[in-house]
Image (spheres, rainbow, N blue to C red):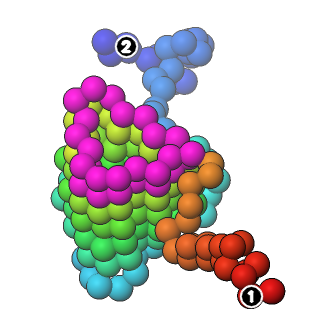
Amino acid sequence: MFQKVIGKNSGEPVPPSSTPIQPAPTTPTPINPAPVASNQPVAASAPARPSAAASRNVLSTDVEVKGILKFTNDLIVDGRIEGEIHSDGNLTIGENARIKAEIRTATVIVHGKVHGNITATDRVDLKAGAEIVGDIKSKVLSMEAGAVFVGKSTIGASAPAANAPAAAAPAPAAKVAEKA
């Protein structure tokens, strides 16, 4: 494994292949501390540098959040959240996740357990191990065999908004004609 290198003092040339190669020094990767649970709004945001990995945020199994969670791009949750989740991005709820929240995002993929209503502007995918107790409003809903869903669903582009007032019924024509 080790080769004897002939030095300059011997007068013999040293071939380039026999010169030992030193590995480049490595710098340690900084570790971010785990988020602290609080009642204040929590914003999960990507680092300032642009890259594909930078737009994905992960809350692992040892993370618990209580309050309002807002994020921009993609979020993968495998921990516990209690409160509200708001985003224009994509939310993936992992197998170990336990969510008690009102969810409003573009897309939701559920592998774990959710107790609360889900409103998605695009789609909701319930995977085989998913358990949902709450209402779902979305353009598209897909549900794999083995998923459990207890609640109402409003699916399609013409789904009414949650806070939209009911349309006033017009007065019957017969009563209007009698007064004339």
Instruction: Indicate the quadrant where residue 44 lies.
Output: bottom left
Of tags 1 and 2, which is closer to the observer? 1
Badge 1 or badge 2: first in the primary sequence: 2
Q: Regarding mark 1 in the picture, which secondary structure is present there?
A: helix
Residue 143 is situated, as x and y percent measured from the top left of the image, at: 36, 34
Residue 58 is situated, as x and y percent measured from the top left of the image, at: 37, 53
Q: Quadrant of the N terminus?
A: top left
The residue shown at (29%, 53%) is: 151
Residue 175 is situated, as x and y percent measured from the top left of the image, at: 67, 79
Identified by mark 1, the residue type is Lys
Give neighbour class at mark 2: few <14, some 14-19, many 20+ (Cα, 10 Å).
Answer: few
The residue shown at (31%, 67%) is: 101
As rendered, which of 172 and 36 lies closer to the eye? 172
Magenta residue check for 146: yes
* Residue beneath disc 2: 3
* Residue beneath disc 1: 179
Image position of 142 (left or right of 59): right
Identified by mark 2, the residue type is Gln
Residue 143 visible in the picture: yes
The residue shown at (50%, 20%) is: 19
Q: CA distance from mark 1 to mark 2?
A: 112 Å
The residue shown at (69%, 73%) is: 174
Residue 170 is situated, as x and y percent measured from the top left of the image, at: 67, 74
Q: Bounds of the magenta span?
A: 132-156
As rendered, which of 174 and 61 lies closer to the eye? 174
